[in-house]
Image: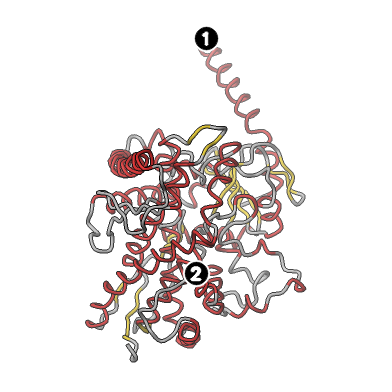
Amino acid sequence: MFMLLAVVLLAVGLAVLIYQKFADQLYYAGKIGGPKGYPLIGNALRFVNKSPPEFFLAIERTVHEAGKCFRLWLGPELLIVVTDAKVAEGILSSPKFIDKSDEYNFIRPWLGNGLLTSSNRKWHSHRKIITPTFHFKILEQFVEIFDSQSNILIDQLLPKVKSGETFDIFPLITLCALDVICESAMGTKVNAQIHADSEYVQAVKEITTIIHIRTYDLLARYDFLFNLLSFRKRQDKALEILHGYTNSVIQSRRRELAETNDTKTSDDATNDLGIRRKVAFLDMLLQATVDGRPLTDVEIREEVDTFMFEGHDTTTSAISFLMYRLAKHPEIQRKVYDELTVVIGEDVNEPFTLSKLNELHYLELVIKETLRLYPSVPFFGRKILENSEIEGKVIPAGTNLILMPMFMGRDPEYFDDPLEFRPERFEAETSSEKVNPYRYIPFSAGPRNCIGQKFAMAELKSVASKVLRHFELLPPVEGQEESFIGEMILRPTYGIMLSLKKRNRD
């Protein structure tokens, strides 16, 4: 009898502690409202045992059913989903809400506490250090890399033209983007487009796959279960390769700087790792100081790996969906091509410059319209650390707040005929229209906006321009319904299927 009473008291005590811990969340989440949930599991049944495209459709249905701001419970986790531009502005414009949501923990094994995942003082100091990397003079150097790697992409695409086949361009763009970002971030060439089966290339593919899986697999979300699954061993093996490679590049370059004490060496000079001595990003980090001390190798690796992650999958997604839309809209493709011949000229071998890329105004409109419909990062999140009122709603402490630019860009309240692909809509926008700029946030906004968006826009223009100067993009003979894998990066479920026709004047 005494034991039974003790068990009952213990259970009651635990229930009280749990209630006290979640009381604010339960109270304020109830006021916000959302789809009906169940005890303990909340709304998890909506998403459990679903494939990636089914998971995305479940999110889409929930957004349409529940409105622009609603709560979800995934077990004990409270998520508040936002597609309201005013609420998004209240969150993103404030320096108070800069902590990333728990979903970003899935990236930490690779990126550590780099710029994407860090917060507070470390984020502020590292953001200040890294910002000069994207000065226009340094971006000009990156354009050289975009151009040379795009030339390799053209060589990879030529056999597709000769065969006349319909093919998935997404994997080829992935390898090109990986080559670009490796050379830009570390100054080393991995030749992913030529050696797609290399150990490093496969490790990047493996780690990004695991990160994607953890965003939709409810079992893999929790560390104590993830550590029991085969994914953990696969992750450890991939990280050993990735961190080992980055460390070797950093240490090699640090030795060079120590020996020569001169970062302004010849553009063509390389060491045995293939490192170009004119490397803005890595060299800048190696020479940076925080509180009077140099960055450690681990801190440098975190930032380099962050640049790798953010500049690899995101640009692949954007370029691929851009190609898809240009293939579907030949009249828009023709206008882009005409602009290219005017700005850059008839010679397809003429290299790009940053100033020429900046003159491609119509192509920029097309890219913006592509990112409205297909933002590379379809969802991003913030962790709310204390009870906060935003647009009349109290967001309780401990909430993971998820913003969804994917659905904001397709909202008829924000964009007329939102599913129509009309690049000119961005040209027509003026401040007099009094539209909320937070309705369109493919690069996020506010203090934690994407630091590399100018880099990304230049790369998108460069790669797309190179392809269009050589080839006409043709859609597949049979139409294919759009289907998405909406995880940390937006991807097409069935790839980007198209065919190519060589330009007559080539």
Instruction: From the viewer's perspective, tell me whether residue 445 is left or right of residue 266.
Output: right
The mark nearer the N terminus, 1 or 2, is 1
Scheme of colours in the image: secondary structure
Q: Nearer the viewer, residue 129 or 4?
A: 129
Q: Position of residue 411 (x, y in %)?
A: 62, 68
Q: Which mark is residue 354?
A: 2
Pick the residue in front: 365 or 371: 365
Q: Amino acid at mark 1?
A: Met
Quarter of the image where one finds residue 123? top right
Q: Secondary structure at mark 1?
A: loop
- Spot occupied by residue 199 in the image (x, y as percentages of width and height): 24, 50
Give, as a three-letter code, the residue at label 2. Answer: Leu
Q: Is residue 394 left or right of residue 455?
A: right
| Residue at image coords 43%, 50% | 216
Q: Nearer the viewer, mark 1 or mark 2?
A: 2
The answer to whether residue 288 is above or below residue 68 is: above
Asked if one can make out residue 231 in the rendered structure from this viewpoint, the answer is no
Q: In screen coordinates, is 70 left or right of 451?
A: right
Numbered tag placed on residue 291 in the rendering: none
Crowdedness near tag 1: few (<14), some (14–19) or many (≥20) residues, C-alpha within 10 Å? few
Rendered position, 47 above or below 495: above
Label 2, secondary structure: give it.
helix
Seen as rendered, the residue at the extreme top is 2
Q: Relative to 402, does residue 60 appear above or below in the rendering?
A: below
Q: Which residue is mark 1?
A: 1
Residue neighbourhood size for the residue with mark 2, other residues' Cα within 10 Å, grouped as few (<14), some (14–19), many (≥20) = some
Q: Residue 224: image x %, image y %?
A: 40, 33
Q: Quadrant of the C terminus?
A: bottom left
The answer, for residue 43, to whether it is visible in the render is: yes
Foreground of the two, 285 or 364: 285
